[in-house]
Image (cartoon, grey):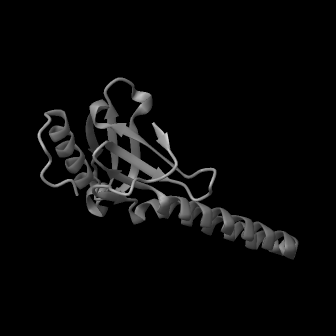
């Protein structure tokens, strides 16, 4: 299921951790070194190269900042996108949620940045998998608790 706008009433929101920004920044720093080497060949070539990679890095960082995992009364959703043609949301309705899990290792535990997986009951292609979710372990507990309430038709005491 895909839509263009976030609903006005959402439950708890989970965003990307600072660890998601490490890769784009390291790639940019490597490209700056290469750009500086190109400056020795042609000044304008190195400057254009560095400006291009600066733009790529900024777009990647803004895209990472736009990713939000959230819940509402209908299900679990991911909103993302910075450009009008790429903004949107997708997710899984409560009736189709299988379960939510997270991947834990030493670094994810240390930085509290987990890969969150929300499974779809019928197809693996429709599941949500997001790396670098801040407080991902809390997100999984929140999603599973809301799913349990939705599945058993018990009223959830606190959606947020």
Q: Is residue 83 above or below residue 152?
A: below
> Residue farthest to the front?
8
Q: Quadrant of residue 68?
A: bottom left
Relative to 141, 114 lies left or right: right
Residue at image point 40% right, 59% down: 16
Q: Is residue 127 above or below residue 81?
A: above
**Spot occupied by residue 133 in the image (x, y as percentages of width and height):** 36, 55
Q: Is residue 10 above or below residue 103?
A: below
Q: Quadrant of residue 6?
A: bottom left
> Residue farthest to the top?
122
| Total numbered labels placed on residues in the image | 0
Q: Is residue 142 above or below residue 53?
A: above
Residue closer to the observer: 71 or 64: 71
Q: Quadrant of residue 61?
A: bottom right
Residue at image point 56% right, 52% down: 87
**Spot occupied by residue 90 in the image (x, y as percentages of width and height):** 45, 42
Residue at image point 60% right, 50% down: 86
Relative to 69, 67 lies left or right: right
Relative to 3, 117 lies left or right: left
Residue closer to the observer: 73 or 39: 73
**Spot occupied by residue 54 in the image (x, y as percentages of width and height):** 67, 69
Q: Which of the image's four quarters has the N terminus?
A: top left
Residue closer to the observer: 50 or 148: 148
Q: Which of the image's four quarters has the C terminus?
A: bottom left
**Spot occupied by residue 154 in the image (x, y as percentages of width and height):** 11, 39
């Amino acid at each position: 299921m895909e839509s263009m706008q976030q609903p006005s009433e959402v439950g708890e929101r989970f965003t990307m951790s600072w660890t998601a920004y490490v890769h784009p920044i390291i790639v940019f720093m490597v490209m700056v070194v290469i750009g500086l080497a190109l400056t020795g060949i042609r000044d304008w070539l190195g400057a254009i190269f560095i400006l291009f990679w600066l733009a790529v890095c900024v777009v990647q960082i803004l895209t990472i900042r736009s990713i939000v995992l959230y819940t509402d009364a209908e299900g679990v959703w991911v909103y993302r996108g910075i450009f009008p043609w790429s903004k949107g949301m997708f997710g899984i309705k409560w009736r189709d949620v299988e379960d939510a899990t997270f991947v834990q290792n030493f670094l994810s535990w240390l930085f509290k940045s987990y890969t969150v997986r929300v499974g779809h009951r019928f197809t693996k292609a429709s599941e949500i998998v997001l790396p670098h979710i801040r407080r991902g372990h809390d997100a999984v507990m929140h999603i599973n608790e809301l799913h349990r309430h939705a599945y058993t038709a018990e009223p959830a005491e606190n959606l947020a």
